[in-house]
Image (cartoon, coloured by chain):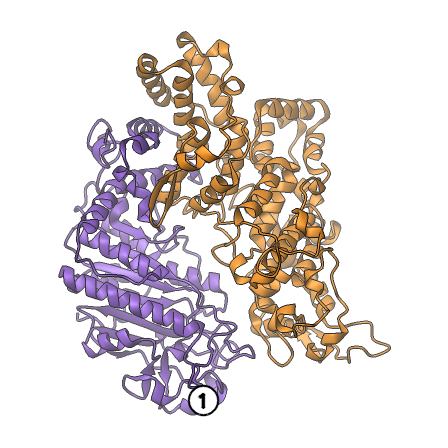
Chain colours: A purple, B orange
Amino acid sequence: MKGLGGLGFLGGTGAGLFPSLCAGADELDPDGPIFVLIHQAGGNDALNTVVPVDTLDSTYYYQDRPNLALAADDVLPLENGLGLHPALQGFKGLWDADELAIINGVGNSNPILSHFRSIDIWEGADPAASTGSGWLGRYFDHQCEGAEEFDARIGIDVRSAASLAFRSANNDAALTISNPQFFDYLNAEEELSSALGFDDALRKGIASGLIDRQIPATGSLEYVTATLKSALSGSGDIQASLQTAAADANETIFPSSSIGGSLKDVARYIGGGMPTSTYFLTQGGYDTHSEQYILDSAGRPLAGRHAGLLGDLDSAIGAFTDELKRQGVWDRVVVMIYSEFSRKIIQNGNDGTDHGAAGSVFIAGGKAQSGLYGAYPSLAPDDRILNQSMPMTTDFRRVYRTILERWFSLSAADAANLLGIALEDHQSLDFLAP
Amino acid sequence: MVNVFSDASWTYESAAHLLSRTTMGSTRDERIALFELGEAQGVEAAVNSIVAAADDWDDFLFPSWWDSQDVPGPAGSVTLSEDEFVEWYCLQLTQANPLGAKMFKFFVDHAPVSAELLIEQNRWIYMFKHFSLCRTHALGNFRTFIEGLSWDGAMMWMLDLRVSSRFNLNENFGRELLELFTLGVDGGYSEEDVVACTRAFTGRVTPAVQPDDWPYTPYLDRSDRFPRDRPAFYYFIDTDEKTFLGQTLTGFIPGDRDEERVDHTEEVLEIIFQQETCGEYLVSKLWRYFVSPVPPEGLVQELGERFRTEHGYELRPLLKDIFMSEAFYSPENIGNQIKDAGDYLVSCTKALEVDLPDPSVLFVSLENMGYSIISPPNIAGWPEPEGVGNGWLGAEKMLFRVNFPLLWLQESFVMFDRTGVTSSRILIGQTPPSDFSLDRVAPGQVRGRRNIHLLLEELNDRFLPFHRLSEQQKEFLIENDERNYRELDEESRIRELIRLIMALPEFQLQ
């Protein structure tokens, strides 16, 4: 191996070009709280996930979903007449262990049935979808306040494209890595390593472009440069994490699904001691306009796409939980699972459902407090919004505020400020203890 | 009136900028020729030379099975690899009429389809038909393109149009037609309009849900015609009265002797294309694609109005408006757009004057750059090349891009997949060697050690036409070159210099 040490250059001749951490702020805490955010992309059908089998509104549920509705006998009972989709066995185990909170009726004050606008609302924490920065990006900025830029390792976007959620207000770039094998080249044999361009010469070449540049107004060059820097500064740690995990014969076996692979990567980063506080993952496929279900052998709508997606998520979360417990860090981790919107109360004609509004959010973790938070939305016809969709009962920023305040220990005023909310209007919830 | 760029303001940099945004990469000779044309005959002549160039899609043939009864996949006897499809597409990006290629790429992104969501037995027919639709109308009429999408088998699968009937409405296509294809999310429609639009587009049933022996397979037809009349499906079409964007469409019985209409879709499209937001939406997307994410105040409205009323949604005159506008040449727009993956691929081949890599390498390279042509991230397409927060360039994409030119410079590159890193030397060993020629890029007379400053000038202009190498960058490159002078032969030394220049952040910009 010659000259490819991940951080070697950063501490060497280039010192000062790449401030290694948020200069002037506290260094990232390798034992600090970890937040894992999972987006169920496409619009998860909350009504068939947290199912109102025996509530005051159950009649509407069964009337409007003659083929799609799940029978009371088939769901995993929670409380208040609600039950989990039977594919969520692992979730039920977390619930029973007092490690899974469910927040129902989560939405925003400006609901819209567009995937992309809704995603911008969620990721920007802004019902007007006009901030241009993400709620976590603003949190990173806040953590590195006073520094010129934040450490790219503060957050890892475990996706192929950078999300709005991580977008800083200052053009800084967190790491975006859907496939850590990109950083595995340090392992490669000598011949392969030397064929690779990311060596000392390249590092210095890139660095030579970083100083004394006129940065154009819209910052494209600044952005490219920041991204290059994040790749450089992250590569050493990523590499170390992979090597640590690869050497561990007792690592939990993860399912081979895409979300299983992503959560395995995150568990490896955590196990390898990455100082990262926030991970963002996506599980796609929830846009179930057609063939949301197929009938199982007993004639129940328990097979098909939606059940498959929930099953993949459930087994991936199960392995993730097991692995973090094995590592002894489950109490350091909170997992939040949400979707950009839910689906309509009525089924459509293609064994599916069209876009809807408010839905359910899950919070799992060693410190999460099981229970139902946020009232389940009314299904009564007069209460429906946007052509047969569920109205919200709980503003999504109350969930964010709880995370910022009770997990990341921000002051109430700082949390409210980052989320653009009034303190008294959007109180924290009790899924985490104050 | 949109301010027009004056002939007096035309410079070499204007010509370079115009070429860079309309062609995905140019040579210095091309830049000089365009500059001289503009100087002699004015900006309009220069713009016309790009906008008026004729389509040449016929030069890029479909595979030989296209005109036979044979089909690739489980139902037929021919095979087709994904590599071949991607190569067919990329050949057009690099070799077709450049503005046509650029607009082809735009429409593939504007209305993206995912091969894996299409029924396997007809997958490649649908894919070729869809891409053919995108290229045929690339410099044609936007409205015709949109109507074509509603008859496009791939899109009908992608957005469930194939199963939406009057009895079983499915909003997927109706919503995205308004939100993503024509009006934009703020386009002024309501949820009721989504339903009315969905009701109009009913009864377009694809063969997969027909009986096996059903002879009527218009969506697999190898021609470009739209099968508007489809009597077998009248029963499934919602022809009841409906109100769409404030206009009432009277009900009728399809097949009635005095009735020319089969459904309400032509009226719905007419209403959509009457909306001011329809012209504005496409203009704002095109401005972002060709110029910047922040158009000047009022420009989108004005160009959108002209596009809708004067140009009748013809794309060439709209593109001419854009490339003639003063704002297009505004200094903050010069050399300040991040190349998307397609731009990056083509710009590498043009700057190095090389051909595309072998199809097997090409496919995986584009995947590694986040541009999986046959499986877009979602129905909104690939992330926009809009600078800050640019989704094309996460850390791993950046690593890959920086290493990518090694493919030609050292006939080596590295692929990444979930199982690990593979050296493409294995692949390269099976494929023809790179056609990179140092003579084309660095003429002999500037290669000597004493001419390093001349060589840097030459390479600066070729690879970074909008940026001057800074003193620090030059210092570094010269220092590095000095070291290499002792260790490497001349050819390797200069290849290394090129590699480092192509790895600078500035090479990611156009």
Res A189 → quadrant: top left
Q: Position of residue B426 (x, y in %)?
A: 40, 36
Q: Position of residue A84 (x, y in %)?
A: 32, 80
Q: Is residue B427 visible?
A: yes
Which image quarter holds the N terminus of chain B?
top right
Say which residue appears at 74% left-offset and 64% top-offset. B227
Q: Residue at x 73, y 38 (%)?
A: B54
Residue B27, above or below B78 = above
Q: Is residue A411 above or below residue B80?
A: below
Q: Amino acid at mark 1?
A: Tyr
Give the residue displayed 56% in from the left and 79% down from the top.
Answer: A349
Marks counted in the figure total 1
Q: Is residue A309 above or below residue B498?
A: below
Name the spot of residue A152 as percent of width and height, x first: 28, 45
Tell me if A254 is positioned left or right of A359 in this view: left
- Residue at the farthest top position: B450
Chain letter of disc 1 in the image:
A
Q: Secondary structure at mark 1?
A: helix
Q: In the figure, is residue A221 to the left or right of A12? A: right
Compared across the picture, whether B144 is left or right of B453 comes to: right
Outermost front residue: B77
Seen from the viewer's position, the closer of residues B73 and B222 is B73
Q: Is residue B26 left or right of residue B39?
A: left
Q: Position of residue A49 (x, y in %)?
A: 37, 77
Which residue in the protein does label 1 denote?
Answer: A62
Image position of A76 with respect to A153: above or below: below
